[in-house]
Image (spheres, rainbow, N blue to C red):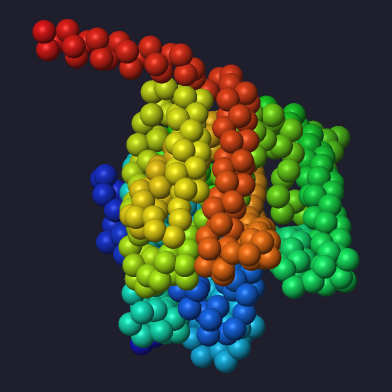
Amino acid sequence: MGKKISKGVGKPLDSADAYANGHLSRTALISLIILTFITFVGNFTQLQLSSALPTIVKDFHISVTTGQWLTSVFQLVMGVMVPLTAYLTRRFTTRQIVITSMIVFTVGSVLAWLGPTFVIVLLGRILEAIGTGVMWPVLQITVFSIYPLSRRGFAMGTVGMAMSVAPAIGPVIGGWQTDANGWRSIFMTLTVIGVASVLLAFFGLHNFGATDRNTKADFFSVSLSIFGFGGLMFGFTNIEAHAFTHPLVWLPIVIGIAGIIWFVMRQIHMAAAYRAWERADNAAEGTSAPAVPSVPASETGAAAGMTAGTTAEHTATGSGTATPVQEAAKRSNRGTTAPATSSKSKPVPHPSSAPRPALLDLGVLRNTSFTVGTICAALSFFAFSSIMVIIPLYIQNDRGYSATMSGLIMLPGAIGQCIAQFCGGRLLDRFGARPVALVGSATLLIGTIMMSMIGTDTWIWWVSISQFTRQIGMGLVLMPVTTWSLNCLARQEVSAGSAVTNTVRQIAGAIGAPVMVITMETLTRVFQTGGLNATLANIDGVKWTLRISACFVLAQLLLVMFGVHGQGAGSAREAAQYAINRMRLHGGAGD
Protein backbone atom coordinates (compact mmCIF):
# COMPACT_ATOMS: atom_id res chain seq x y z
CA MET A 1 0.00 0.00 0.00
CA GLY A 2 2.89 2.32 0.80
CA LYS A 3 4.34 1.76 -2.67
CA LYS A 4 0.97 2.53 -4.25
CA ILE A 5 0.61 5.78 -2.29
CA SER A 6 4.20 6.74 -3.04
CA LYS A 7 3.65 6.14 -6.74
CA GLY A 8 0.52 8.31 -6.68
CA VAL A 9 2.17 11.29 -5.01
CA GLY A 10 5.38 10.91 -6.97
CA LYS A 11 3.81 12.16 -10.20
CA PRO A 12 4.83 15.81 -10.74
CA LEU A 13 2.08 18.42 -10.66
CA ASP A 14 2.15 21.22 -13.18
CA SER A 15 0.67 24.67 -12.57
CA ALA A 16 -2.58 23.77 -14.39
CA ASP A 17 -3.17 20.81 -12.05
CA ALA A 18 -2.14 22.72 -8.93
CA TYR A 19 -3.95 26.04 -9.45
CA ALA A 20 -7.19 26.39 -11.41
CA ASN A 21 -10.10 28.85 -11.36
CA GLY A 22 -8.37 31.01 -8.78
CA HIS A 23 -7.97 28.24 -6.23
CA LEU A 24 -5.41 25.64 -5.20
CA SER A 25 -6.25 22.03 -5.85
CA ARG A 26 -6.57 19.80 -2.80
CA THR A 27 -3.34 17.92 -3.55
CA ALA A 28 -1.37 21.14 -4.08
CA LEU A 29 -2.78 22.66 -0.88
CA ILE A 30 -1.76 19.61 1.15
CA SER A 31 1.74 19.66 -0.34
CA LEU A 32 2.13 23.38 0.36
CA ILE A 33 0.97 22.94 3.97
CA ILE A 34 3.49 20.13 4.48
CA LEU A 35 6.36 22.18 3.02
CA THR A 36 5.39 25.24 5.07
CA PHE A 37 5.24 23.17 8.27
CA ILE A 38 8.66 21.61 7.68
CA THR A 39 10.21 24.99 6.83
CA PHE A 40 8.58 26.46 9.94
CA VAL A 41 10.26 23.74 12.02
CA GLY A 42 13.65 24.67 10.54
CA ASN A 43 13.28 28.36 11.40
CA PHE A 44 11.86 27.41 14.80
CA THR A 45 14.91 25.23 15.54
CA GLN A 46 17.46 27.88 14.62
CA LEU A 47 16.92 30.03 17.74
CA GLN A 48 15.35 27.48 20.05
CA LEU A 49 18.59 26.88 21.95
CA SER A 50 19.29 30.53 22.75
CA SER A 51 17.42 30.32 26.08
CA ALA A 52 18.87 26.88 26.88
CA LEU A 53 22.50 27.81 26.17
CA PRO A 54 23.46 28.79 29.77
CA THR A 55 22.19 25.42 31.04
CA ILE A 56 24.05 23.48 28.33
CA VAL A 57 27.27 25.34 29.15
CA LYS A 58 26.96 24.35 32.82
CA ASP A 59 26.08 20.71 32.10
CA PHE A 60 29.07 20.11 29.84
CA HIS A 61 31.44 22.35 31.85
CA ILE A 62 32.45 24.27 28.75
CA SER A 63 33.00 27.94 28.04
CA VAL A 64 30.32 30.17 26.60
CA THR A 65 32.51 30.63 23.51
CA THR A 66 32.46 26.89 22.89
CA GLY A 67 28.77 26.51 23.75
CA GLN A 68 27.63 29.19 21.30
CA TRP A 69 28.84 26.95 18.47
CA LEU A 70 25.47 25.21 18.80
CA THR A 71 23.94 28.42 17.44
CA SER A 72 26.63 29.78 15.14
CA VAL A 73 27.40 26.48 13.41
CA PHE A 74 23.70 26.18 12.56
CA GLN A 75 23.83 29.53 10.77
CA LEU A 76 27.12 28.69 9.05
CA VAL A 77 25.86 25.38 7.67
CA MET A 78 22.62 26.99 6.49
CA GLY A 79 24.70 29.65 4.73
CA VAL A 80 26.61 26.93 2.89
CA MET A 81 23.41 25.06 1.97
CA VAL A 82 21.69 28.08 0.34
CA PRO A 83 23.77 28.14 -2.88
CA LEU A 84 23.91 24.33 -3.00
CA THR A 85 20.11 24.26 -3.24
CA ALA A 86 20.35 25.39 -6.87
CA TYR A 87 21.94 22.05 -7.77
CA LEU A 88 19.70 19.94 -5.52
CA THR A 89 16.42 21.34 -6.88
CA ARG A 90 17.49 20.69 -10.48
CA ARG A 91 18.96 17.26 -9.88
CA PHE A 92 16.42 15.70 -7.49
CA THR A 93 12.64 15.71 -7.13
CA THR A 94 10.81 17.64 -4.42
CA ARG A 95 9.97 14.44 -2.54
CA GLN A 96 13.53 13.14 -2.69
CA ILE A 97 14.92 16.39 -1.30
CA VAL A 98 12.36 16.81 1.47
CA ILE A 99 12.28 13.18 2.65
CA THR A 100 16.08 12.91 2.67
CA SER A 101 16.41 16.27 4.43
CA MET A 102 13.98 15.25 7.15
CA ILE A 103 15.71 11.91 7.67
CA VAL A 104 19.02 13.76 8.13
CA PHE A 105 17.28 16.22 10.48
CA THR A 106 15.81 13.36 12.54
CA VAL A 107 19.15 11.56 12.83
CA GLY A 108 20.73 14.82 13.97
CA SER A 109 18.01 15.35 16.57
CA VAL A 110 18.55 11.82 17.94
CA LEU A 111 22.30 12.42 18.24
CA ALA A 112 21.75 15.73 20.03
CA TRP A 113 19.11 14.15 22.28
CA LEU A 114 21.21 11.16 23.37
CA GLY A 115 24.76 12.42 22.78
CA PRO A 116 26.92 11.89 25.87
CA THR A 117 29.45 14.58 24.92
CA PHE A 118 29.27 18.12 23.57
CA VAL A 119 30.97 17.05 20.33
CA ILE A 120 28.20 14.53 19.61
CA VAL A 121 25.53 17.14 20.37
CA LEU A 122 27.31 19.58 18.05
CA LEU A 123 27.42 16.93 15.30
CA GLY A 124 23.69 16.42 15.73
CA ARG A 125 23.17 20.16 15.45
CA ILE A 126 25.14 20.22 12.19
CA LEU A 127 22.95 17.44 10.75
CA GLU A 128 19.85 19.40 11.78
CA ALA A 129 21.14 22.44 9.90
CA ILE A 130 21.91 20.34 6.80
CA GLY A 131 18.40 18.93 6.90
CA THR A 132 16.63 22.26 7.24
CA GLY A 133 18.98 24.49 5.24
CA VAL A 134 17.41 23.67 1.88
CA MET A 135 13.77 23.89 2.91
CA TRP A 136 13.11 27.63 2.48
CA PRO A 137 14.45 27.76 -1.11
CA VAL A 138 12.49 24.58 -1.92
CA LEU A 139 9.33 26.19 -0.55
CA GLN A 140 9.95 29.32 -2.64
CA ILE A 141 10.44 27.29 -5.81
CA THR A 142 7.26 25.33 -5.12
CA VAL A 143 5.22 28.52 -4.70
CA PHE A 144 6.68 29.80 -7.98
CA SER A 145 5.68 26.62 -9.79
CA ILE A 146 2.13 26.59 -8.38
CA TYR A 147 0.88 30.19 -8.36
CA PRO A 148 0.40 32.50 -11.35
CA LEU A 149 2.35 35.74 -11.42
CA SER A 150 -0.56 37.81 -10.09
CA ARG A 151 -0.83 35.72 -6.90
CA ARG A 152 2.80 34.97 -6.07
CA GLY A 153 3.35 38.07 -3.94
CA PHE A 154 0.31 37.24 -1.80
CA ALA A 155 1.36 33.59 -1.48
CA MET A 156 4.94 34.39 -0.51
CA GLY A 157 3.75 37.07 1.92
CA THR A 158 1.44 34.58 3.63
CA VAL A 159 4.11 31.88 3.85
CA GLY A 160 6.70 34.45 4.95
CA MET A 161 4.56 35.60 7.87
CA ALA A 162 4.48 32.03 9.14
CA MET A 163 8.26 31.89 8.86
CA SER A 164 8.60 35.14 10.83
CA VAL A 165 6.57 33.73 13.72
CA ALA A 166 8.88 30.71 14.15
CA PRO A 167 11.87 32.60 15.61
CA ALA A 168 9.51 34.42 17.97
CA ILE A 169 8.22 31.32 19.72
CA GLY A 170 11.39 29.20 19.44
CA PRO A 171 13.26 30.70 22.44
CA VAL A 172 10.09 30.76 24.56
CA ILE A 173 9.24 27.09 24.05
CA GLY A 174 12.92 26.14 24.31
CA GLY A 175 13.21 27.94 27.63
CA TRP A 176 10.03 26.36 28.97
CA GLN A 177 11.18 22.86 27.97
CA THR A 178 14.58 23.43 29.57
CA ASP A 179 13.03 24.47 32.89
CA ALA A 180 10.41 21.70 32.86
CA ASN A 181 12.34 18.66 31.58
CA GLY A 182 15.91 19.71 30.80
CA TRP A 183 17.46 20.89 27.53
CA ARG A 184 17.55 17.36 26.05
CA SER A 185 13.75 17.39 25.91
CA ILE A 186 14.08 20.00 23.13
CA PHE A 187 15.83 17.47 20.90
CA MET A 188 13.47 14.68 21.92
CA THR A 189 10.57 16.82 20.69
CA LEU A 190 12.44 17.63 17.47
CA THR A 191 13.02 13.91 16.92
CA VAL A 192 9.28 13.26 17.12
CA ILE A 193 8.61 16.20 14.79
CA GLY A 194 11.24 14.89 12.37
CA VAL A 195 9.65 11.44 12.20
CA ALA A 196 6.22 13.02 11.67
CA SER A 197 7.65 15.21 8.89
CA VAL A 198 9.13 12.19 7.10
CA LEU A 199 5.75 10.41 7.21
CA LEU A 200 3.88 13.51 6.05
CA ALA A 201 6.27 14.01 3.15
CA PHE A 202 6.14 10.34 2.13
CA PHE A 203 2.36 10.03 2.12
CA GLY A 204 1.18 13.56 1.25
CA LEU A 205 3.85 15.52 -0.65
CA HIS A 206 3.76 15.75 -4.46
CA ASN A 207 6.61 16.60 -6.82
CA PHE A 208 6.77 19.99 -8.54
CA GLY A 209 8.91 20.99 -11.49
CA ALA A 210 11.27 19.07 -13.74
CA THR A 211 14.61 17.44 -12.91
CA ASP A 212 17.78 17.03 -14.92
CA ARG A 213 20.13 14.13 -14.16
CA ASN A 214 22.93 15.84 -16.10
CA THR A 215 23.07 18.76 -13.68
CA LYS A 216 26.52 19.36 -12.25
CA ALA A 217 27.59 20.81 -8.91
CA ASP A 218 30.87 22.22 -7.70
CA PHE A 219 31.34 20.30 -4.46
CA PHE A 220 34.96 21.42 -4.25
CA SER A 221 33.70 24.99 -3.76
CA VAL A 222 31.42 23.72 -1.00
CA SER A 223 34.46 22.16 0.70
CA LEU A 224 36.43 25.39 0.34
CA SER A 225 33.62 27.40 1.94
CA ILE A 226 33.40 24.97 4.86
CA PHE A 227 37.15 24.97 5.50
CA GLY A 228 37.39 28.72 4.92
CA PHE A 229 34.63 30.02 7.16
CA GLY A 230 34.78 27.08 9.57
CA GLY A 231 38.53 27.48 10.06
CA LEU A 232 38.16 31.20 10.68
CA MET A 233 35.47 30.58 13.32
CA PHE A 234 37.48 27.78 14.97
CA GLY A 235 40.59 29.95 15.23
CA PHE A 236 38.69 32.87 16.76
CA THR A 237 37.00 30.51 19.22
CA ASN A 238 40.37 29.26 20.50
CA ILE A 239 41.57 32.79 21.31
CA GLU A 240 39.80 32.48 24.66
CA ALA A 241 41.92 29.51 25.76
CA HIS A 242 45.23 30.17 23.98
CA ALA A 243 47.47 33.07 23.00
CA PHE A 244 47.28 34.30 19.42
CA THR A 245 50.72 32.78 18.74
CA HIS A 246 49.44 29.28 19.60
CA PRO A 247 49.06 26.97 16.56
CA LEU A 248 45.43 26.23 17.48
CA VAL A 249 44.70 29.94 16.96
CA TRP A 250 46.78 31.27 14.09
CA LEU A 251 46.88 28.09 11.99
CA PRO A 252 43.05 27.68 11.62
CA ILE A 253 42.75 31.41 10.95
CA VAL A 254 45.40 31.24 8.21
CA ILE A 255 43.75 28.15 6.70
CA GLY A 256 40.38 29.88 6.88
CA ILE A 257 41.60 33.05 5.17
CA ALA A 258 43.37 31.01 2.48
CA GLY A 259 40.23 28.94 1.93
CA ILE A 260 38.04 32.03 1.61
CA ILE A 261 40.42 33.66 -0.89
CA TRP A 262 40.60 30.44 -2.91
CA PHE A 263 36.80 30.13 -2.80
CA VAL A 264 36.28 33.70 -4.05
CA MET A 265 38.82 33.38 -6.85
CA ARG A 266 37.32 30.06 -7.94
CA GLN A 267 33.82 31.52 -8.07
CA ILE A 268 35.00 34.46 -10.18
CA HIS A 269 36.86 32.17 -12.60
CA MET A 270 34.00 29.64 -12.92
CA ALA A 271 31.39 32.37 -13.43
CA ALA A 272 33.49 33.93 -16.21
CA ALA A 273 33.99 30.54 -17.89
CA TYR A 274 30.27 29.74 -17.72
CA ARG A 275 29.27 33.12 -19.19
CA ALA A 276 31.77 32.59 -22.03
CA TRP A 277 30.24 29.17 -22.72
CA GLU A 278 26.74 30.66 -22.76
CA ARG A 279 27.82 33.31 -25.28
CA ALA A 280 29.33 30.61 -27.49
CA ASP A 281 26.18 28.52 -27.11
CA ASN A 282 23.96 31.43 -28.14
CA ALA A 283 26.22 32.25 -31.08
CA ALA A 284 26.17 28.62 -32.23
CA GLU A 285 22.36 28.70 -32.25
CA GLY A 286 22.40 31.73 -34.51
CA THR A 287 21.34 34.20 -31.81
CA SER A 288 23.24 36.92 -30.06
CA ALA A 289 23.71 36.96 -26.32
CA PRO A 290 20.41 38.15 -24.87
CA ALA A 291 20.22 41.57 -23.33
CA VAL A 292 17.19 40.45 -21.38
CA PRO A 293 16.83 37.34 -19.25
CA SER A 294 16.64 34.07 -21.12
CA VAL A 295 13.78 32.95 -18.86
CA PRO A 296 10.18 34.00 -19.40
CA ALA A 297 9.16 37.43 -18.20
CA SER A 298 6.60 35.85 -15.92
CA GLU A 299 9.38 34.16 -13.93
CA THR A 300 11.87 36.99 -13.68
CA GLY A 301 9.21 39.64 -13.26
CA ALA A 302 7.83 37.72 -10.33
CA ALA A 303 11.21 37.50 -8.69
CA ALA A 304 11.90 41.21 -9.12
CA GLY A 305 8.38 42.33 -8.29
CA MET A 306 8.15 40.18 -5.25
CA THR A 307 11.15 41.85 -3.66
CA ALA A 308 9.40 45.21 -3.82
CA GLY A 309 6.43 44.24 -1.73
CA THR A 310 7.51 41.56 0.70
CA THR A 311 10.30 40.83 3.14
CA ALA A 312 13.92 40.23 2.31
CA GLU A 313 13.41 36.50 2.54
CA HIS A 314 10.75 36.65 -0.17
CA THR A 315 13.19 37.13 -3.00
CA ALA A 316 14.00 35.03 -6.03
CA THR A 317 14.76 31.38 -5.38
CA GLY A 318 17.79 31.59 -3.18
CA SER A 319 20.16 30.20 -5.80
CA GLY A 320 22.66 31.54 -8.21
CA THR A 321 21.11 29.84 -11.21
CA ALA A 322 17.69 29.31 -12.69
CA THR A 323 15.10 27.07 -11.11
CA PRO A 324 13.93 23.85 -12.78
CA VAL A 325 10.85 25.69 -14.06
CA GLN A 326 13.00 28.40 -15.53
CA GLU A 327 15.45 25.93 -17.06
CA ALA A 328 12.61 24.02 -18.70
CA ALA A 329 11.18 27.23 -20.08
CA LYS A 330 14.58 28.24 -21.35
CA ARG A 331 15.01 24.98 -23.23
CA SER A 332 11.49 25.30 -24.57
CA ASN A 333 12.14 28.83 -25.80
CA ARG A 334 15.29 27.71 -27.52
CA GLY A 335 13.44 24.96 -29.28
CA THR A 336 10.75 27.27 -30.65
CA THR A 337 12.43 30.59 -31.21
CA ALA A 338 15.83 29.71 -32.58
CA PRO A 339 15.89 30.53 -36.27
CA ALA A 340 16.64 27.94 -38.86
CA THR A 341 20.30 27.68 -39.70
CA SER A 342 22.04 26.58 -42.84
CA SER A 343 24.37 23.66 -43.17
CA LYS A 344 27.25 26.09 -42.73
CA SER A 345 26.03 27.12 -39.29
CA LYS A 346 28.18 26.32 -36.32
CA PRO A 347 27.28 23.09 -34.51
CA VAL A 348 25.41 23.54 -31.26
CA PRO A 349 27.66 22.63 -28.30
CA HIS A 350 26.63 19.44 -26.57
CA PRO A 351 25.23 19.98 -23.04
CA SER A 352 27.89 17.68 -21.62
CA SER A 353 30.56 20.15 -22.76
CA ALA A 354 29.12 22.90 -20.57
CA PRO A 355 31.32 23.94 -17.66
CA ARG A 356 29.91 23.79 -14.17
CA PRO A 357 28.27 27.04 -13.06
CA ALA A 358 29.75 28.85 -10.08
CA LEU A 359 28.33 27.96 -6.69
CA LEU A 360 27.92 31.72 -6.10
CA ASP A 361 28.01 34.20 -8.96
CA LEU A 362 30.03 36.94 -7.25
CA GLY A 363 29.92 39.03 -10.42
CA VAL A 364 26.80 40.73 -9.01
CA LEU A 365 29.07 42.50 -6.50
CA ARG A 366 30.32 44.68 -9.36
CA ASN A 367 27.05 46.56 -8.89
CA THR A 368 27.91 49.20 -6.26
CA SER A 369 24.33 49.56 -4.98
CA PHE A 370 23.99 45.81 -4.52
CA THR A 371 27.32 45.67 -2.68
CA VAL A 372 26.22 48.48 -0.34
CA GLY A 373 22.98 46.64 0.43
CA THR A 374 24.84 43.38 1.06
CA ILE A 375 27.33 45.04 3.42
CA CYS A 376 24.45 46.68 5.33
CA ALA A 377 22.74 43.31 5.74
CA ALA A 378 26.01 41.70 6.87
CA LEU A 379 26.66 44.43 9.48
CA SER A 380 23.11 44.06 10.79
CA PHE A 381 23.40 40.30 11.19
CA PHE A 382 26.91 40.55 12.67
CA ALA A 383 25.80 42.98 15.38
CA PHE A 384 22.40 41.35 15.91
CA SER A 385 23.23 37.63 16.17
CA SER A 386 25.60 38.10 19.10
CA ILE A 387 22.87 39.79 21.14
CA MET A 388 20.71 36.68 20.87
CA VAL A 389 23.49 34.75 22.65
CA ILE A 390 24.76 37.37 25.11
CA ILE A 391 21.46 38.67 26.54
CA PRO A 392 20.12 35.26 27.71
CA LEU A 393 23.44 34.82 29.55
CA TYR A 394 22.91 38.15 31.32
CA ILE A 395 19.28 37.34 32.15
CA GLN A 396 19.98 33.86 33.55
CA ASN A 397 23.54 33.91 34.90
CA ASP A 398 23.80 37.50 36.14
CA ARG A 399 20.19 38.19 37.14
CA GLY A 400 19.12 34.68 38.17
CA TYR A 401 15.99 34.37 36.03
CA SER A 402 14.82 31.08 34.51
CA ALA A 403 15.21 29.98 30.89
CA THR A 404 11.45 30.35 30.42
CA MET A 405 11.61 33.94 31.64
CA SER A 406 14.52 34.57 29.30
CA GLY A 407 12.44 33.43 26.33
CA LEU A 408 9.48 35.56 27.39
CA ILE A 409 11.68 38.65 27.71
CA MET A 410 12.99 38.15 24.17
CA LEU A 411 9.55 37.32 22.70
CA PRO A 412 8.24 40.90 22.14
CA GLY A 413 11.32 41.72 20.07
CA ALA A 414 10.73 38.87 17.64
CA ILE A 415 7.07 39.86 17.27
CA GLY A 416 8.17 43.47 16.69
CA GLN A 417 10.52 42.42 13.91
CA CYS A 418 7.72 40.43 12.27
CA ILE A 419 5.47 43.52 12.33
CA ALA A 420 8.26 45.78 11.06
CA GLN A 421 8.99 43.48 8.13
CA PHE A 422 5.31 43.39 7.21
CA CYS A 423 4.96 47.19 7.35
CA GLY A 424 8.35 47.78 5.76
CA GLY A 425 7.13 46.61 2.36
CA ARG A 426 4.39 49.23 2.20
CA LEU A 427 6.69 51.95 3.49
CA LEU A 428 9.27 50.96 0.89
CA ASP A 429 6.73 51.24 -1.93
CA ARG A 430 5.61 54.67 -0.71
CA PHE A 431 8.86 56.35 0.37
CA GLY A 432 11.72 54.34 -1.13
CA ALA A 433 14.49 52.43 0.65
CA ARG A 434 16.62 55.32 1.93
CA PRO A 435 14.22 57.01 4.42
CA VAL A 436 12.89 53.67 5.72
CA ALA A 437 16.38 52.24 6.20
CA LEU A 438 17.59 55.46 7.86
CA VAL A 439 14.76 55.29 10.39
CA GLY A 440 15.43 51.58 10.89
CA SER A 441 19.18 52.04 11.39
CA ALA A 442 18.61 54.91 13.84
CA THR A 443 16.05 52.81 15.76
CA LEU A 444 18.45 49.85 15.87
CA LEU A 445 21.22 52.14 17.19
CA ILE A 446 18.96 53.67 19.86
CA GLY A 447 17.82 50.22 21.01
CA THR A 448 21.40 48.98 21.24
CA ILE A 449 22.46 52.02 23.31
CA MET A 450 19.42 51.52 25.56
CA MET A 451 20.40 47.91 26.16
CA SER A 452 24.01 48.89 26.97
CA MET A 453 22.70 50.72 30.06
CA ILE A 454 21.87 47.50 31.93
CA GLY A 455 23.18 46.85 35.42
CA THR A 456 22.71 44.67 38.48
CA ASP A 457 19.32 46.15 39.39
CA THR A 458 17.94 47.19 35.99
CA TRP A 459 14.22 46.60 35.57
CA ILE A 460 14.25 43.33 33.65
CA TRP A 461 11.55 44.45 31.23
CA TRP A 462 13.86 47.30 30.20
CA VAL A 463 15.83 44.59 28.42
CA SER A 464 12.63 43.49 26.66
CA ILE A 465 11.78 47.06 25.64
CA SER A 466 15.32 47.60 24.35
CA GLN A 467 15.25 44.36 22.38
CA PHE A 468 11.83 45.25 20.99
CA THR A 469 13.25 48.59 19.82
CA ARG A 470 16.28 46.88 18.26
CA GLN A 471 14.24 44.33 16.34
CA ILE A 472 11.81 46.95 15.06
CA GLY A 473 14.85 48.70 13.62
CA MET A 474 16.22 45.43 12.29
CA GLY A 475 12.99 44.74 10.41
CA LEU A 476 12.95 48.24 8.91
CA VAL A 477 16.56 47.94 7.74
CA LEU A 478 16.84 44.46 6.30
CA MET A 479 13.78 44.35 4.06
CA PRO A 480 14.09 47.78 2.37
CA VAL A 481 17.87 47.68 1.85
CA THR A 482 17.90 44.10 0.57
CA THR A 483 14.94 44.73 -1.73
CA TRP A 484 16.47 47.95 -3.07
CA SER A 485 19.84 46.29 -3.69
CA LEU A 486 18.23 43.39 -5.57
CA ASN A 487 16.10 45.76 -7.63
CA CYS A 488 19.31 47.53 -8.69
CA LEU A 489 20.40 44.34 -10.47
CA ALA A 490 19.36 43.26 -13.95
CA ARG A 491 16.44 40.83 -13.94
CA GLN A 492 18.60 37.88 -14.90
CA GLU A 493 20.91 38.63 -11.93
CA VAL A 494 18.23 38.73 -9.21
CA SER A 495 18.45 35.02 -8.43
CA ALA A 496 22.27 35.13 -8.14
CA GLY A 497 22.03 38.29 -6.03
CA SER A 498 19.54 36.65 -3.68
CA ALA A 499 21.90 33.70 -3.16
CA VAL A 500 24.87 35.98 -2.44
CA THR A 501 22.89 38.17 -0.01
CA ASN A 502 21.39 35.25 1.93
CA THR A 503 24.74 33.47 2.14
CA VAL A 504 26.64 36.56 3.30
CA ARG A 505 23.99 37.32 5.93
CA GLN A 506 24.08 33.80 7.37
CA ILE A 507 27.88 33.71 7.49
CA ALA A 508 28.09 37.20 9.03
CA GLY A 509 25.66 36.07 11.73
CA ALA A 510 27.63 32.87 12.29
CA ILE A 511 30.92 34.75 12.68
CA GLY A 512 29.40 37.61 14.69
CA ALA A 513 28.32 35.44 17.62
CA PRO A 514 31.73 33.91 18.48
CA VAL A 515 33.61 37.18 17.88
CA MET A 516 31.35 39.19 20.19
CA VAL A 517 31.17 36.44 22.82
CA ILE A 518 34.98 36.27 22.88
CA THR A 519 35.02 40.05 23.22
CA MET A 520 32.61 39.84 26.16
CA GLU A 521 34.62 37.16 27.97
CA THR A 522 37.93 38.96 27.36
CA LEU A 523 36.52 42.19 28.80
CA THR A 524 35.08 40.25 31.73
CA ARG A 525 38.53 38.89 32.61
CA VAL A 526 39.99 42.39 32.36
CA PHE A 527 37.38 43.76 34.77
CA GLN A 528 37.93 40.84 37.16
CA THR A 529 41.64 41.57 37.14
CA GLY A 530 40.74 45.14 38.04
CA GLY A 531 39.08 43.96 41.26
CA LEU A 532 35.38 43.41 40.38
CA ASN A 533 33.61 40.24 41.42
CA ALA A 534 32.51 37.72 38.78
CA THR A 535 28.93 39.02 38.40
CA LEU A 536 29.82 42.71 38.19
CA ALA A 537 32.71 41.98 35.82
CA ASN A 538 30.45 39.94 33.54
CA ILE A 539 27.78 42.67 33.46
CA ASP A 540 30.41 45.27 32.57
CA GLY A 541 31.69 42.90 29.87
CA VAL A 542 28.17 42.63 28.44
CA LYS A 543 27.69 46.42 28.56
CA TRP A 544 30.92 47.20 26.71
CA THR A 545 30.28 44.46 24.16
CA LEU A 546 26.92 46.07 23.46
CA ARG A 547 28.65 49.41 23.00
CA ILE A 548 31.03 47.81 20.49
CA SER A 549 27.98 46.36 18.75
CA ALA A 550 26.54 49.87 18.63
CA CYS A 551 29.65 50.97 16.71
CA PHE A 552 28.83 48.40 14.00
CA VAL A 553 25.27 49.72 13.87
CA LEU A 554 26.61 53.29 13.59
CA ALA A 555 28.78 52.20 10.66
CA GLN A 556 25.67 50.72 9.05
CA LEU A 557 23.74 53.97 9.60
CA LEU A 558 26.50 55.97 7.90
CA LEU A 559 26.60 53.47 5.03
CA VAL A 560 22.85 53.85 4.50
CA MET A 561 23.12 57.63 4.74
CA PHE A 562 25.88 57.95 2.14
CA GLY A 563 25.55 54.76 0.10
CA VAL A 564 21.83 54.19 -0.46
CA HIS A 565 20.82 56.55 -3.24
CA GLY A 566 19.73 56.51 -6.84
CA GLN A 567 16.73 54.84 -8.47
CA GLY A 568 14.29 53.35 -5.97
CA ALA A 569 16.13 54.74 -2.95
CA GLY A 570 13.74 57.63 -2.38
CA SER A 571 14.51 60.73 -0.36
CA ALA A 572 14.23 61.45 3.33
CA ARG A 573 13.19 65.03 2.47
CA GLU A 574 10.34 63.74 0.29
CA ALA A 575 9.21 61.38 3.05
CA ALA A 576 9.22 64.20 5.63
CA GLN A 577 7.32 66.50 3.28
CA TYR A 578 4.75 63.78 2.66
CA ALA A 579 4.25 63.31 6.41
CA ILE A 580 3.88 67.08 6.96
CA ASN A 581 1.32 67.34 4.15
CA ARG A 582 -0.67 64.45 5.64
CA MET A 583 -0.67 66.14 9.06
CA ARG A 584 -1.85 69.42 7.54
CA LEU A 585 -4.55 67.61 5.59
CA HIS A 586 -5.91 65.87 8.68
CA GLY A 587 -5.57 69.07 10.71
CA GLY A 588 -7.58 71.00 8.13
CA ALA A 589 -10.23 68.29 8.06
CA GLY A 590 -10.52 68.44 11.85
CA ASP A 591 -11.03 72.20 11.79
What is the x, y in percent for residue 581? 30, 10
| Image quadrant where one finds the C terminus | top left
- Residue found at the very far left of the displayed protein: 591
Instruction: Judge left or right: residue 460 versus residue 67.
Output: left
Q: Residue at x 70, y 37 (%)?
A: 364
| Number of numbered markers | 0
Instruction: Judge left or right: residue 559 versus residue 470.
Output: right
Query: In the rendered view, would you say 535 is above or below 417?
Result: below
* Residue in the foreground of this view, choosing between 449 and 566: 449
Which image quadrant for residue 250?
bottom right
Q: Residue at x 49, y 86 (%)?
A: 113
Q: Residue at x 73, y 43 (%)?
A: 362
What is the x, y in percent for residue 481? 53, 34
What is the x, y in percent for residue 202? 42, 77
* Residue in the foreground of this view, choosing between 17 and 42: 42
Instruction: Judge left or right: residue 78 versus residue 154.
Output: right
Q: Residue at x 45, y 44 (%)?
A: 450
Query: In the rendered view, would you say 190 is above or below 431?
Result: below
* Residue in the foreground of this view, choosing between 96 and 508: 508
What is the x, y in percent for residue 342? 79, 33
| Image quadrant where one finds the N terminus | bottom left
Q: Is residue 469 visible?
A: yes
Q: Is residue 296 visible?
A: no
* Residue in the foreground of this view, choosing between 230 and 455: 455
- Residue found at the very far front of the displayed protein: 531
